[in-house]
Image (cartoon, grey):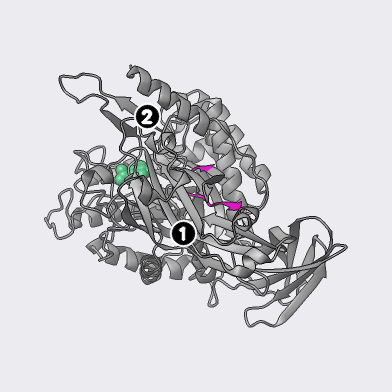
């Protein structure tokens, strides 16, 4: 690939400056919550927005757009935050834009936050895809690589410098994917001037969802005292009727301090207490956290209130943070997945954060609707395919008892150059960030470090061994997997996973239309995987596209009848293997979702059992019947 001279140099320069740095994790990432000593101010709404359409996408940096109001640098439009910017306007150039886009807005900061030197003010972005740089009043406060996890910066001293001026926040976001990003991609320049205009380039990707971009999750300011609770880690266990919570609290800001920990039940009644930065809370007559449909009272949460008093020579600081927590255990044997020592059978879905207009933008009505649909369907679990979802979604799972396989954005790792050291070290950082954010959620029962990587390639063995060992060192309480599609004898990372998660599309991508071969191929496939790795198996994806309203009997591909018949042929095999080593089934996909344009996709992927607007196809009713039957057969509490 040859690249025009000056453009190539500029691109290389910003890639080096931007992608070359691995930022160490320096502290906790507690979800911002209000308390008597903490305030939260949401900055959601309309921001000014400008895409940098200059040929090298670098005009914003060359002309230092962050130094002024964006509106003073050129034409801006109104852009909702949170939302993907792609589908907001009528402009296909913005829908398919690759490069830097800029957002800014002014914020009125409460006077007390500025005058009170004992208050820390933190700016937090829930997520922005993919690479972000943030300035406050023209000064850079942070940058972050990765499109699905939060990042923040303390801005107290900056906003105190010019207390009378409104505080201007500028965020530049770049959606370019390279061989070393997660997910990876490549930029390809088309240099044939008889076919393409000068400077024409495309973003290639090896994954099947639209590369939505922008500020996808809430942006907010929150305060803590100068000495504050920075991180909390809990691990839970139980013996007979007694629950055990091992906790660790880290405090930042210096000074000797006193920590009081109080545990309350769901009704706010005192349960247990402790002092100090680490310890064990004992819970008599414990109410365990159970999955939905496995217990009459699923998703039981206690509240752990951490109260801090820190004293210096001149001042006293007080902080309080309340963490919801569930008490449960997770264990894996050769044939079973155990929650609270009882066999758990996953009957669930794979999702995407995806909807009309907002793209991947955070949206409460959509989230609540999806939970209502999942509960209607009898879903007890889902996989966050193919990237970490908003923390608010995980909190819903905690409360409703929906079990999660928490997946990092390691999707589309197909090029051998994406198995190099730079890719691996970034992947390790993403796992650090993911575990740091999600470690305390009872709903998260397993980490998935990747989806369908080219795991047959020789470097895959070292890559996955390192990645899985690293993840297990970060969190010793949960199993680790990656989702695979390769044939058993080709898979290099297989020996390191705790659970085999396998995707297959028999009678769809292969042997098209031949539903009759599914039973033979699927059961051979399972037997091979089990013989080779002796681990429990989850069917982590299976399905067929169905265009809603398209009918044909006998079934033909793309009709609702074919989707139903294909699911049914898989279910017959699942039911045979269920009492052996087969521990779960996750349909691909919960709802239709947008993809890049291509001849295999007719306005997106249609394997949803709901349409993108969340209306049921015939398959939703088939699955609903099955999942409620499974809940009755597998979900009841089995006698010891
Ligand atoms: C897969 C991928 C998923 C795709 C799906 C499909 O194996 O994991 O991202 O969308 O197949 O529909 O092809």
Instruction: Report the quarter where the N terminus lies.
Output: top left
The secondary element bearing badge 1 is classed as: strand
Q: Which residues are magenta?
A: 144-154
Instruction: Report the quarter where the C terminus lies.
Output: bottom right
Could you say which quadrant of the image residue 454 lies in? top left
Sequence order check, earlier mark of 1 and 2: 1
Q: Residue furthest right?
A: 313
Ligand 1 - quadrant of the structure image = top left
The secondary element bearing badge 2 is classed as: strand
| Pointer 2 residue | 186
Could you say which quadrant of the image residue 431 lies in? top right
| Mark 2 residue crowding within 10 angstroms, few (<14) / some (14–19) / many (20+) | some
Q: Residue at x 49, y 62 (%)?
A: 107
Q: Residue 153 placed where, x, y %?
A: 59, 51
**Residue 361 horizontal side relative to residue 554, left or right:** right
User: In the depicted view, which residue is nearer to us: 128 or 328?
Assistant: 128
The relative height of residue 432 versus residue 324 in the rendered view (above or below) is above
As drawn, the label of residue 106 is 1
Q: Residue at x 17, y 54 (%)?
A: 559
Q: Residue at x 62, y 79 (%)?
A: 266
User: In the depicted view, which residue is nearer to us: 273 or 524?
Assistant: 273
Q: Residue 296 placed where, x, y %?
A: 53, 77
User: In the depicted view, which residue is nearer to us: 557 or 300?
Assistant: 300
The relative height of residue 489 versus residue 363 in the rendered view (above or below) is above
């Amino acid at each position: 690939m040859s690249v025009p001279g000056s453009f190539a140099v500029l691109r290389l320069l910003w890639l080096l400056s931007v992608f070359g740095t691995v930022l160490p994790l320096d502290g906790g990432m507690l979800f911002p919550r209000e308390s008597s000593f903490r305030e939260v101010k949401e900055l959601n709404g309309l921001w000014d927005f400008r895409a940098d359409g200059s040929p090298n996408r670098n005009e914003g940096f060359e002309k230092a757009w962050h130094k002024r109001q964006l509106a003073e640098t050129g034409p801006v439009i109104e852009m909702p935050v949170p939302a993907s910017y792609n589908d907001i306007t009528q402009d296909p150039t913005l829908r398919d834009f690759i490069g830097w886009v800029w957002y800014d807005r002014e914020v009125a900061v409460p006077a007390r936050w500025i005058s009170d030197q004992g208050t820390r003010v933190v700016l937090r972005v829930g997520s922005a895809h993919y690479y972000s740089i943030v300035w406050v009043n023209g000064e850079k406060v942070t940058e972050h690589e990765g499109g699905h996890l939060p990042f923040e910066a303390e801005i107290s001293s900056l906003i105190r410098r010019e207390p009378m001026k409104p505080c201007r926040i500028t965020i530049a976001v770049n959606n370019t994917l390279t061989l070393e990003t997660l997910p990876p991609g490549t930029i390809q320049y088309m240099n044939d001037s008889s076919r393409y205009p000068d400077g024409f380039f495309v973003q290639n990707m090896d994954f099947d969802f639209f590369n939505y971009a922008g500020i996808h999750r809430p942006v907010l300011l929150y305060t803590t005292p100068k000495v504050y609770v920075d991180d909390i880690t809990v691990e839970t266990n139980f013996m007979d009727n007694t629950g055990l919570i091992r906790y660790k609290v880290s405090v930042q800001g210096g000074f000797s301090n006193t920590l009081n920990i109080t545990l309350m039940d769901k009704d706010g009644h005192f349960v247990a207490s402790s002092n100090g930065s680490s310890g064990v809370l004992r819970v008599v007559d414990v109410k365990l956290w159970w999955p939905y449909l496995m217990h009459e009272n699923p998703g039981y949460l206690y509240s752990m209130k951490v109260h801090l008093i820190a004293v210096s020579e001149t001042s006293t600081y007080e902080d309080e943070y309340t963490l919801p927590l569930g008490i449960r255990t997770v264990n894996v044997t050769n044939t079973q997945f155990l929650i609270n020592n009882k066999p758990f059978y996953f009957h669930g879905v794979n999702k995407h954060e995806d909807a009309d207009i907002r793209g991947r933008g955070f949206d409460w009505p959509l989230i609540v609707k999806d939970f209502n649909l999942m509960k209607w369907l009898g879903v007890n679990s889902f996989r966050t395919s193919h990237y970490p979802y908003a923390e608010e979604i995980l909190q819903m799972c905690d409360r409703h008892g929906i079990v999660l396989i928490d997946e990092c954005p390691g999707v589309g790792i197909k090029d051998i150059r994406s198995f190099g050291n730079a890719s691996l070290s970034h992947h390790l950082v993403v796992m650090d960030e993911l575990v740091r954010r999600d470690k305390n959620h009872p709903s998260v029962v397993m980490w998935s470090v990747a989806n369908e990587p080219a795991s047959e390639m020789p470097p895959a063995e070292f890559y996955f061994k390192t990645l899985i060992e690293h993840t297990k060192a970060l969190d010793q309480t949960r199993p680790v997997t990656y989702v695979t599609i390769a044939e058993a004898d080709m898979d290099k990372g297989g020996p390191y996973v705790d659970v085999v998660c396998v995707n297959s599309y028999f009678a769809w991508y292969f042997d098209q239309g031949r539903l009759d071969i599914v039973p033979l191929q699927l059961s051979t496939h399972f037997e091979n995987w089990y013989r080779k790795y002796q681990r429990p198996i989850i069917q982590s994806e299976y399905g067929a596209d169905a265009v809603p309203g398209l009918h044909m009997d006998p079934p033909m591909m793309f009709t609702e009848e074919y989707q139903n018949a294909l699911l049914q042929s898989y279910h017959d095999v699942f039911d045979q293997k269920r009492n052996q080593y087969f521990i779960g089934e996750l349909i691909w996909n919960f709802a239709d979702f947008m993809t890049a344009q291509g001849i295999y996709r007719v306005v997106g992927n249609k394997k949803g059992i709901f349409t993108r607007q969340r209306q049921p196809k015939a398959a939703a009713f088939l699955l609903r019947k099955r999942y409620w039957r499974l809940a009755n057969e597998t979900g009841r509490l089995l006698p010891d």
